[in-house]
Image (cartoon, helix red, strand yellow):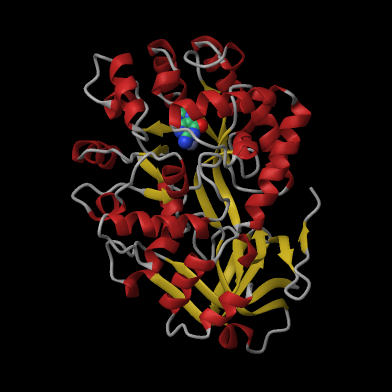
Amino acid sequence: MKKAIRGRVLSYRDNPFTKPLSACLEYEEDGLIVMEGEHITEFGPADILMDGRNDLSITHYPDALICPGFIDVHVHYPQVEIIGAYGTQLIDWLNKYTFVAEQKFSDKSYALQAAKLFLKESLRAGTTTSSVFCTVDPTSVDAFFEMSAKLNMRNIAGKVLMDRNAPPALLDTPQSGYDQTKDLIDRWHGKGRALYSVTPRFAPTSSPEQMEMTGAVWNEHPGTYLQSHISENLAEITWVRDLFPDQESYVDVYRHYGQLGPRAIYGHGVHFTDNDFRIFSETGTALAHCPTSNLFLGSGLFNIATAMTGAHTVRTGLATDLGGGTNFSQLVSMNEAYKIAQLAGVSLGAHQAFYLATRGAAEALYLEDTIGSIAAGYEADITVLDLQATPLLKHRLDFAESLEDILFVLMMLGDDRVTRATYVAGELVYSKNCETGVATFAEF
Ligand code: GUN
Ligand code: ZN
């Protein structure tokens, strides 16, 4: 028997920021998704696909919205224990909280526990792929990928590279960072669904020598990712100007060291100039929009309209940036992204917001032919959202008049309580009983 799920299905095949919705939206009021092994093999109207068949084992989700698993394009798994740490902005927050927490991850059993909790909370939030910062210690990367492999998740991760401006216990050197990165790429990149990301934390914590070797190791391994931070906070930008006086701008630092291009993803870009957007656009470099983090750390207001519809469009995905960010749920990221856009006089549409957490995020990762959509041939990473998850949601949705209304209410009122089921590579790995509220995870 082939596994299938039935219900209201939402997906995107193109970008609703630049194309009419009719060219982007895939929506079936009563749809059927058939899965074989790790993949979706059929998707279409249930009545047509089910007609005359007896080879399907169907799970029906009434009162639900089935969508591609959410994708989080920038997040730090070792920072889960400092979510919601009070009172500081970026640089002080790093020194006071982040660098303290990250020192614990040279202990393998500690790192395994933390990775497990992180992955469980991701699945509870309906997130099936993340681009993850580990710590400077390779142990933290092994722990993360070992846990991720148990669930057969398509996750991207890497060892942080950092050889200055952090506590000694968190520093590598240009050579050890290079060697450890190479070793981890050999061990993990392309193993099962794992993908490796070369991970310079950000320019202030790498010497020019390390920046050089970071660009080199990434360029020596085509197909790997690179992730970092850029233009998040004004004090950070001033610091970069002081540390790299020969470069014209923050973006120019990364360009100079060969760290821009397809499969490079930078968190934030809150204070980007038109020229910064131009360089990212021309090089195919992606941005991670991290709304809950930008608000929590008081970093500033990212301009989603400029990124998606300006003169120089940039592949941009939505991200939590935990633990600077404050919630695992990409519905909450959408909520805060909407409010940030409102403050710039821009109305972020519900379809646009859902796109940013699914297909748009996959485009930022250059994985749009693999994940982020529901269609035959795609990997079967799927999230089922319960439209009656809370009394308020159920009541409010009684007054929704369109699909767009339903999506917008979900992003305003929803969070991980809304996740009814999460499928990874065709397997049900998380589910919540609607009557009892009891959550069940696959063994891992
Ligand atoms: N910039 C450098 N490191 C970090 C980090 O861990 N979190 C955030 N939000 N910004 C950073
Ligand atoms: Zn970050």
Which residue is located at x 61 percent, y 57 percent?
A: 125
Q: Residue furthest right?
A: 443
Q: Residue furthest front?
A: 87
Q: Is residue 168 or residue 424 the one in the foreground?
A: 168
Residue 278: percent from the left, percent from the top? Answer: 22, 40
- Relative to 241, does residue 72 appear above or below in the rendering? below
Q: Is residue 5 or residue 415 the one in the foreground?
A: 415
Q: How many marks?
A: 0
Query: Which of the 4 image quarters holds residue 49?
Result: bottom right
Which residue is located at x 61 percent, y 24 percent?
A: 100
Left/right placement of residue 19 relative to residue 24 reads: left
Q: Is residue 31 or residue 328 the one in the foreground?
A: 328
Task: Please indicate, yes or no, whether residue 271 appears anywhere in the rendered image.
Answer: yes
- Relative to 380, does residue 97 appear above or below in the rendering? above
Residue 251: percent from the left, percent from the top? Answer: 29, 29
Residue 138: percent from the left, percent from the top? Answer: 64, 23
Task: Please indicate, yes or no, whether residue 159 appears anywhere in the rendered image.
Answer: no
Which residue is located at x 33 percent, y 72 percent?
A: 21
Which residue is located at x 51 percent, y 69 percent?
A: 410
- Relative to 95, does residue 412 appear above or below in the rendering? below
Query: Which of the 4 image quarters holds residue 182?
Result: top right
Which quadrant holds the N terminus?
A: bottom right
Residue 161: percent from the left, percent from the top? Answer: 51, 21
